Amino acid sequence: MNSLQHALSRERPNENPLVGNVDADKTAPRNQKTGSPMNPAKINAFVSLRGVLTATWKPGLALWAVAGLVASQPVEAAAASRAVANPPVKVFILAGQSNMEGYGGIKTIDELGDHPTLGGLLKKIKQADGSFVERDDVFLYYHRGDQIIDGPLTVGQGAHPDRIGPELMFGIGMGDHYGEPVLLIKTAWGGKDLYCDFRPPSAGKPAYEIPGQPRQVGAAYRQMVAEVHQCLDHLETIFPQFKGHPHEFCGFVWFQGWNDFCADRKIRERVYEEYATNFVHLVQDLRAEFKVPTLPVVVGELGVDGEQHVNAEMAAFRAAQAKIAGQPELQGTLGYVRTAPYWYAKLDELPRKLEAEERRVKQKVAAKLKEELKGGPEATDSKKMEELVNAAFEKAAQGDEGYQDARREHDRAVSHWECHYFGSARVYCLVGYGLAEAMKCLVPKR
C-alpha cells in the first residue's frame, strides 16, 4: 500500500453520518479518531465511497437532517466516487523567515513531553522505541539552501538536518484533520522582513529610504511565488503518488517578524505602522496569483521572550502585528495565534544558570593563573589574562561537576540563539500545533 492509498484508507467504513456515531445520550455525534463529541459548528459534510452526503446535525435530536442523498442520483454519485478515488491534495503554503525555517533542536524535543497539558503531543512525533514518526499522508516541499526536501513529513526538516520548525506539528495537525493527503510548501529564509524583502507588488515601493546596502524590494515575495509554482507545476514528477490527483489550495501560514521588529531606528516607526497593511497586500496578491479569493490565512505572532520579560520595543511590534486581526479585508478568513505563551520558564532560567557557572569556573581559573604567574608581566596584563583563562576554561569545565550538571540541564532544553526561541523544539512544536488548531477553524473537514 503506497502513501496515498494509506491516506485514502483512512476513510473509515463506519464514517457514515446516519449510522451509530452518536453519544450515549443521543444528542451529539462523536469523533471516531478521538472518541470526543464533535463540535456541531464544525460539521459540514461527510464523504463515503457511495457518494457525498451533506448533513446537518440537529442538537437535541438523535438524527441527521440530510440535505441530499446522492446515491439516488447516478450521475452525481459517479462523480462523487471519482472524487473519493482521486481526492485533491490539500496544499498549504508556509512562509516567513528563520523561525519558519525552524531552529528547534531535535535533541531538545523530549521537553515537549513535560508540558502540563499538551505533553501528549510528543507521542505523535516520537515512538516508544525512540524513533521518530514519518507521516505517509503529509508531505513537505522545501528548498533548504542547495537541497530540496520533497518527501514525507518527519523531524529534521527545519533550517538544518538536526532541527525542526513549525511545519512538523502543523503538518501532523492537518494530516489528522483530513482524510486526504496534505502537502506543505515551505518558503522561508533567515533575515527577511516584510517591509522590503517580502513586500508584495500591490503595496508599492516604500515611501521612505531603506538604510544599509541596496536590496531588491519584493525579492523574497517573488521567490516564494516561484517556488510554489515550481512545486505545483511539476507535482506528479516530484510526488509520483499524486499522479491523477488535482490539488487544492487550503491555506497560507505566516510566521515572521524579527527583522521588522529590529528594523533600523530611522524607519522603525514607519515599519511598525505599515506592517498590518503590508500583510493585507501580501495576502491579496497571493490570493490573486493562485486564484483563491478567500484563501484562509493564519498568522503566528513574534513570541520571543514570552510574556514576562517584554521590553517596550517588543510590545510595540506585537501590537503592530496584532492589528492584522482587525483588518476588514481578512475578516472571516484569518486566524491570529499568540505564540508568546509557548515560551516557558526554563528558557529564561537555564541560559542564565549556565552563564553563572561559566563565570564561576573562569574566576576559579583566573585565580589559579594569577597565583602561578605571580610577579610575571602576564599577571597584570588584562587582555593576556583573558586569553589564558579562555584557553584553560574548557579543560577546567570538563572536570567541574557543577558546571557539567548545568550544561546537561541547559542542553536538554536550549540549543540556539534567543531570537530563535533558544532553539527549543518544544516551542516550535507548540507554535505548529497552535497554527494548525487555528487553521482547522477556517477549513472544512471533508
Image: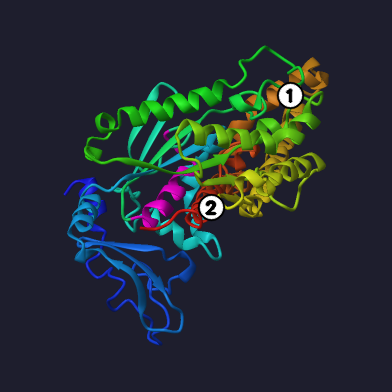
Mark 2 highlights which residue?
430
Q: Main secondary structure of the magenta part?
A: helix
Q: Residues within 10 Å of mark 2 (few under 14, many from 20)?
A: many
Q: Quadrant of residue 388?
A: top right
* Residue 11, position as x, y percentages in the image: 26, 60
Q: Residue at x 46, y 43 (%)?
A: 167
Query: Dot 2 lies on which element?
Result: helix
Give the amino acid at mark 1. Answer: Glu
Q: Does residue 283 appear left or right of residue 262 in this picture?
A: left
Q: Is residue 275 magenta?
A: no
- Res. 244 in view: yes
Q: The disc labelled 2 sits on which kind of residue?
A: Leu
Can you tell which of label 1 and label 2 is closer to the viewer? 2
> Percent position (x, y) of residue 311?
79, 43
From this view, report whether residue 6 is shown above or below residue 389.
below
* Tag shown at residue 386: 1
Q: Which mark is residue 109?
A: none
Query: Which quadrant holds the C terminus?
Result: bottom left
Whole-percent x, y for residue 209 in the image? 76, 17
Residue 295, how many percent across, how many down?
49, 43
Q: Residue at x 29, y 75 (%)?
A: 18
Quarter of the figure with residue 61? bottom left
Q: Residue at x 36, y 80 (%)?
A: 63
Q: Is residue 248 above or below residue 31?
A: above
- The range drawn in magenta is 161-178
Q: Secondary structure at mark 1?
A: helix
Label 1 crowd bin: few (<14), some (14–19), many (20+), radius 10 Å:
some
Between 52 and 182, the one nearer to me in the picture: 52
